[in-house]
Image (spheres, grey):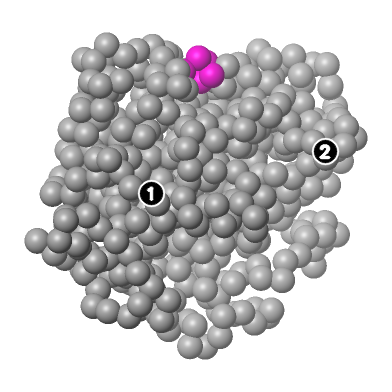
Amino acid sequence: MIESMGLGGGASSYYYIPEASGKSSWCGCRMQQVSLNNHNNNNNLNLSLANSQQAFTAALDLMPGGVNSPVRAFKSVGGQPIFIHSAKGSRMWDIDANQYIDYVGSWGPAIIGHSHPKVLAALAETMQKGTSFGAPCLLENTLAQMVIAAVPSIEMVRFVNSGTEACMGALRLARAFTGKPKIIKFEGCYHGHADSLLVKAGSGVATLGLPDSPGVPKAATSDTLTAPYNHISAVENLFHHHKGDIAAVILEPVVGNSGFILPKPDFLAAIRKITEENDSLLIFDEVMTGFRLAYGGAQEYFGIVPDLTTLGKIIGGGLPVGAYGGRRNIMEMVAPAGAVYQAGTLSGSPLAMAAGIETMKIIREPGSYEYLDKITGELVNGIVEAGKRAGHPMCGGHINGMFGFFFTEGPVNNFADAKKSDAHKFARFYWGMLEEGVYFAPSQFEAGFTSLAHTPDDIQFTIAAAHKVLSNI
C-alpha cells in the first residue's frame, strides 16, 4: 500500500520511486510524490544510507565534523549520521527513503508530534505579518502569561534564543542578586556550552570522550564547583568549605544529559533546604523537563519550587528558543529594569512565540500527561523486559513523556553509575533498532522522548523490534 509522506515540493525536492526490483531510489526531478509503506509493513533490514553517506561526505568539508551539534555525528555509536528529509507525527523519513518511529523528537520539543497542523497554521499566519521585528509584539505577552501561569517559580520571564543563553543569564543574575561569585553544578548535568559550565558536563563531552573543552580558560571555571548528582553530603561539604561564596546551585531536576536519571526521594528537598540556609539561590534547568514532566515542569511534579528556572525546547514548539524566569524581586534586576545586562536580536521571535503558544495549548488539554505516562511506561518496561529475557543486564525508567534505559543492572543515580553501562552493546542495539525502523538518540548518555502523536501500535512495534534486536546481540 502506498501512502502520502507529506514531502515538500520545491524544484530540488527529492521523491521516492519504487523500482521494479523492489529497491528504492531518489531523484531530484519533479514527479509525483509517493512514499514508503506504513511502519507495520516497512522493512528496513539491510538499511541503505547511500544518500546520507554522500551528504555527510560533502558536509565534512563544509562544517566541523560535518554537523552543527556534536551528538549528531554518531561518534558514540559509530557509523555515519542520517540526514532527515521530513517528519510528521511520530515518524521521520531520511533522504534514502527509510522511515522511522522517532523517539528523539528534536531532542525534546516535539511533545505533540512533528509538524502538527495547528502549529503549522499558526506559523503560516504569523509569517504573513513578518518573521522578525526587533521590537515588542503581542505574542511575547501571550506566551509570557502562559509560562508565568504554568510554572510555580516564575513571576517574570525573559525570552532568549537557546537553553545556553537562558542558563548564562540565570547564573549572571544569581551572582548579581546574591553578590557571591561561585556556583555549584553536578557531574553529568549539561547547562549549555558557556565557558563556566563546561565542567563535567555530561552527554556532549562524554560522547566525544573529552573531559572538558579546550579553549576554556581556567579563570572561567575557577568559580564553578562540582558534586556528584544525588550526593547531598558532597554539596554540604562544598558549602562548608566555601562558606559565604556560593551564589547558586544549578541542576537538572531530572537528569537528561547522562541518560535518564531520577533524583533520590529527598535529594531535591535537601538541596532546596541547604540553599535557603546559606542565602544562595536554587536554579532548576528545566530546558528539557519543562512542560514535559508536567505542565508546570519538574517543580510541579516534585513540589519543589526553585528561585530561578531556565526553559527552552517545548516553549518554542520546535523553533529556536530559551527563557529564564523567577521571583519578581530577582528578575527586576535584569536590564532595562535593572543593571544586569542581557540582550538578543532575535529574542522573543514571533515565529517561536506562535509555535510555543499553540504547543502549550495542546499539551495542557486534559489527559495529555496521563497518555504520555501510559505509553512511555509500556515502552520502557517492554524494552527492559526484552533485554532481561535475552540475558542482558538492563535498567530503565520514565516520567510521563521522558525516559531512558541503560545496559547495566543499576541502579543509576549519577554520571559515574551511568558510565558503567555497556556503551558498545548500546551501539549494537542502536543500529539494530535503526534497521527495524526505530530512531533513538545516537548516544547512551541521552534521554528519550515520546509524544502525543505516538500511538499504542508505535509502542508495540518498537517493543517487538527490541525483542528481535536484543535476542541477536
Instruction: Give whichever of 315, 45 is nearer the camera.
Output: 45
Real-space Cα separation, disc 1 to disc 2, in angstroms: 37 Å
Toward the left, the furthest residue is 1
Instruction: Give whichever of 182, 328 is nearer the camera.
Output: 182
- Residue 438 appears anywhere in the view: no
Give the quadrant of residue 400.
top left
Q: Which residue shows up at 46% across the image and 50% down it?
A: 53
x and y percentages locating residue 376 in the rendered image: 28, 37
Task: Find disc 2 in the rendering and name its residue.
Answer: 216
Give the quadrant of residue 239.
top right
- Residue 471 appears anywhere in the view: yes
Q: Which residue shows up at 66% across the image and 70% down it?
A: 346
Q: Which residue shows up at 63% across the image and 46% down it?
A: 65
In the displayed structure, would residue 19 be above or below residue 173? below
Can residue 418 be found in the magenta stretch?
yes
Q: Residues within 10 Å of mark 1 (few under 14, many from 20)?
A: some
Magenta residues, start to end: 417-421
Q: Quadrant of the N terminus?
A: bottom left
Left/right of residue 348 with respect to residue 396 in the rendered view: right
Can residue 61 be found in the magenta stretch?
no
Q: Which residue shows up at 55% across the image and 35% down it?
A: 75
Q: Residues within 10 Å of mark 2 (few under 14, many from 20)?
A: some
Q: Which numbered mark, 1 or 2, is in the foreground of this view?
A: 1
What numbered label is drawn on residue 49? 1
